[in-house]
Every structure is written in structure tokens, then in C-alpha cells.
Amino acid sequence: MHIKGPTVIKPAGNKPKLIEEFFGRVNSQTEALSMAKMTSPGGWLEPGQTPEFDEYTVVLKGSLRVETKAGATDVKAGEGVLAPRGEWVRYSTPGDEGAEYMAVCLPSFSPDNVHRDE
């Protein structure tokens, strides 16, 4: 399967964020995994979530804050992080520079399996 370009997905959060899905339920009708490039502005914050998928993230530019019940970690360009399924997590970009990163979800992300906080 050749993917000629991503589909832009509507994001959650307090500021506009660009989600470009290359593989997943929308762009390739793939349920096994999803892969998307994210571009989040400085000051962006999304609701916490307890997803039914493992999320592997690699930061390409800037810094991404990953909060869990154990604490917060700032993941910088060139670094990666795993958020395991079934554990609460919240992502944000509190720095002015924001962040650009790739996220892979196993199985693929969907609004029904992310379980965002209300």
C-alpha cells in the first residue's frame, strides 16, 4: 500500500494542533496501528486520557511534556517515550517553541478507544 499523503485529523486541546495521519483508521483503514505526525504550538494542552493502545512517540523538534500518575517528563528532540495502554497520560507543549513529533499507536487510535477525561 502506497500512502501518497496524510489525512488531517481534528485534534483535542486548548489550541489548534496539526495531526497528519499517514496510517490509521481514517487514512488507510488500518486498525492494527496508526502513525501520525503531530505539530503542537507552544502552550498547547490536551485532556488526559486512559487509552486502549500503546503509544510510541519520537520528538523531532521542540519539547513534549508527558504527564502520568508517576510524574511529568519533558521529552526533547531526538528522544522517545512509550505511554502504555491502560495507564493515564496527558500530553502538552508548555514551552514557547511547541513540538513536532511522530506517534505510533498499537492498535490504532480511535475516539472510542482513547477514553479522554471529561
Image: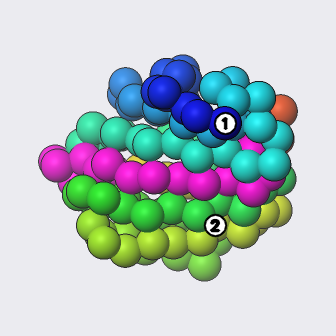
Q: Quadrant of the C terminus?
A: top right
> At numbered mark 1, what does the secondary structure look like: helix, strand or loop?
loop
- Residue 23 appears left or right of 54: left
Q: Residues within 10 Å of mark 1 (few under 14, many from 20)?
A: few
| Label placed on residue 1 | 1
Q: Which residues are magenta?
A: 93-111
Is residue 17 depicted above or below 34 in this figure? above
| Label placed on residue 109 | none
Please state the horizontal and vertical placement of residue 103, each as a whole percent of the image. Answer: 53, 53
The answer to if 103 sits in the magenta stretch is yes
Is residue 118 depicted above or below 56 in this figure? above
Q: Residues within 10 Å of mark 2 (few under 14, many from 20)?
A: many
Front: mark 1 or 2: 1
Q: Which residue is mark 2?
A: 83
Please state the horizontal and vertical placement of residue 63, each as a whole percent of the image. Answer: 29, 61
Q: Amino acid at mark 2?
A: Ala
- Residue 7 appears left or right of 113: left
